[in-house]
Amino acid sequence: MGPLQDMIVIDFSQFLSGPSAGLRLADLGARVIKIERPGTGDICRQLYVSDVMIEGESTIFHAINRNKQSYAADLKKEEDLEKVKKLIRQADIVLHNFRPGVMERIGLGYETVRQLNPRIIYGEVNGYGHEGPWRGLPGQDLLVQSLSGLAWLSNNRDQRPTPMGVAVVDILAGTHLTQGILATLYRRGIDGQSALVQVSMLESVLDFQFEALTCFFNDGRQLPVRSRISNGNAYVPAPYGIYKTRDGYLSLAMNDVPSLGRLLGCPALEVYSDSSLWFDKRDEIKEVLSMHLLTRGVDEWLSMLQPADIWCAKVLNYDQLMRETGYKMLNMELKVTTSNGLSIKTTRCPIRIDGQMVFSETGAPLLGEHNERIDTEFRLMS
Amino acid sequence: MNDLPLSGLTVLEFSQYLSGPSAGLRLADLGARVIKIERPGTGDACRRLSIKNLWVGDDSLLFHTINRNKESFTADIKSPDDIAIIHRLIERADVLTHNFRPGVMEGAGLDYASVRAVNPRLVYAAISGYGKEGPWKDLPGQDLLLQSMSGLAYTTGNEMDHPMPFGLSIADSLCGAQLVQGILAALIRRQKTGEGGLIEISMMESLLDFQFEFLTTYHTSGLLPQRSKYSNGNPLLSAPYGIYEAADGYIAIAMVNIPRLARVIDAAALEKHSQEQAFSHRDEIKKIISEHLAGQPVKYWLEKLHAADMWAMQVLDWKGLMEEEGYQRLDMEQVIAAGERENIITTRCPIRVNGQKIKSGRPAPLLGQDRDSIVREFLK
């Protein structure tokens, strides 16, 4: 039984940002009911990635929407809208990620919903806030990354702006939304009051950059400069980055450069005894290092560095990662099964509670799978 | 806001650097009272970790960024006297966080079982690098190394590039954010049961969770994610998803239909490709788009794409961003009044509650600055 046991979430959101918040709430014990448009449902159902699908459905839809229920309702129909309103009266949380104004037009804006249910926690994610010239723009991960300056932090100096290759903005915004929902739920436990929680993807990705942005705000607004080779972080001195070896890649975090030189048998590094040079001459140091590291294999280098407590690691791909005992012992894989018997391997919730991992085996719902059950249980028909 | 959702809660933060302290910062901004428990003399090691050699008094600007809106209490967890005082704080606290390597808190007698005996209502939240068991448990929980080991480095950059890390500490940030989720869920449960709880997350599990779409797709297909040869934006996604160079800058294009794109940007060479080929032929398609977009400035393309309601955006750096009204209206910056020290500018909490932005101008504490007042308050 999760800590949010008995909480009911009515989730109108689609794609990733909102639904990832719903998934976390579900894994923490809440009952999450997706409200989906009849016929098509969450657009993510048809968002196939990498030409891979599971019985005609998108792998990512299954990953994002496991452990939820689906209630199909056409919010433009009075009858369906009334049912959804009845459902909301009996719920704890409403979630959506429509563009600003859409829920109000449907008749499910916060003020209306609060009249229906004065204890409701109403969470919304949008792209760029609900004011200002960007409010109507699509809140899409790559586009928000691009606008936010984030694309100038990864890759090397002479390379083009480079987006982070995972939907980091969606995921962080969903995470922040969950934080806000849980904080206001906590307060509701004390004062019984409803609350509105709003997160925009742009604010979330600015928050993600808070260390670097604070530096920028206070250093005379100098833009970040990525290192010329093996950039790991534009603000961190050499050797921070990933290096090619004779047979694979080695990652080196913050380390003392002369010690590294001694351990690796690279005397050219030993001259950098003044630590302030590790930033100012990072390209020069990284150049020396990258040439030297090509001369041996990654395991050989690790055997020289790890005993000396140097912060280093072998760069792994998924095939390699999953052969590691360290990975297997995390027990991170989760098998879920849908109501039509489809079985999918995904990952579990990363949060352990009272020493227990959370393994919920319920797969993603079919579109409208729970209409009948929910109609009856919540008495929506009368 | 004086009615912040977590007002009345007290958090004892034994955490250092970024992962745990970023959780403390969020809890503080949401209204909790966060007391850093720091080692006398040195404190949170982040106090001495500067970026670009920027300092505020004796502490790094980085420390100030992560630890504003908190208090500082110095205590040596190896001293029995100080442990006795810490127990008194624990009696009255709601949450404890730490991000020591496995064994350190146990060695100090501050493991969960011992602390629960002092205060059964306490929520005890711990971050580790790789979990408490297994061959990796004593490895340093460092962001770049975790990115490297978790497969994440094969998501960014193009096919022929080296594995490429995210240029920010994603493992730290995400793990801290998830710790907050776990803490708050346990606090909600406590309202019903009266019992605290133990919340544990490792940075490795956070990063695996972060890649859940990739891993689910990988488990289904058995194929490693492949970065595209040009303009990789996300290895899972079809052309044109990525950033392209125009004549005078860069433009991002997300999911759009290929034949429609061909018409909108008037790219004849693209017309031979159907939407069905958007993944299987993505390198070829991206190459055509790259060559085509190079011919005209960003503004020219954006007007066409936006007129057709296509998902595209200019790529900005921070200076460009901050000149935009869209940024200014967010009011994302806040000034921290650092007492006699200079004012610093930082970002505010990204969560709005009841339409209100949450700001706090309170600076990070000097090492041990609140020890005397806390002793008076808690030990009286």
Image (spheres, coloured by chain):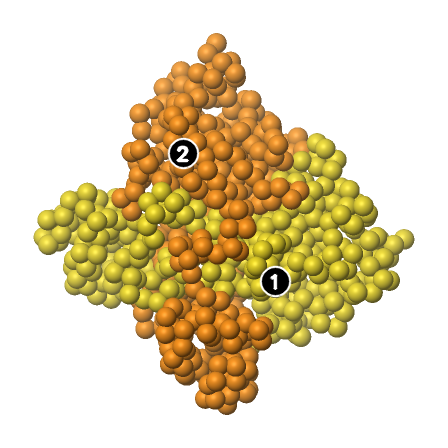
Q: Left or right? Give the position of B171 relative to A318.
A: right
Above or below, B312 against A53 in this view is below
How far from the left and from the top, in percent, is residue A301?
47, 75
Q: Which mark is residue A14?
A: none
Q: Residue furthest top?
A: A382
In the rendered image, which residue does mark 2 sit on?
A343
- Amino acid identity at mark 1: Asp
- Residues under numbered marks 1 and 2 in contact, where contact means CB atoms less than 8 Å apart: no
Q: Which chain is orange?
A: A
Name the residue: 44% across, 42% down.
Answer: A346
In the rendered image, which residue does mark 1 sit on?
B138
Q: Left or right? Give the position of B158 relative to A243.
A: left
Q: Left or right? Give the position of A139 relative to B98.
A: left
Name the residue: 56% across, 39% down.
Answer: A358
How far from the left and from the top, in percent, is residue B313?
31, 54
Name the residue: 29% across, 61% down.
Answer: B159
Q: Which chain is yellow?
A: B
Q: How many marks?
A: 2
Above or below, B366 against A28 in this view is below
Pick whichever, A272 or B263, lies toward us.
Answer: A272
Label 2 crowd bin: few (<14), some (14–19), many (20+), radius 10 Å: some
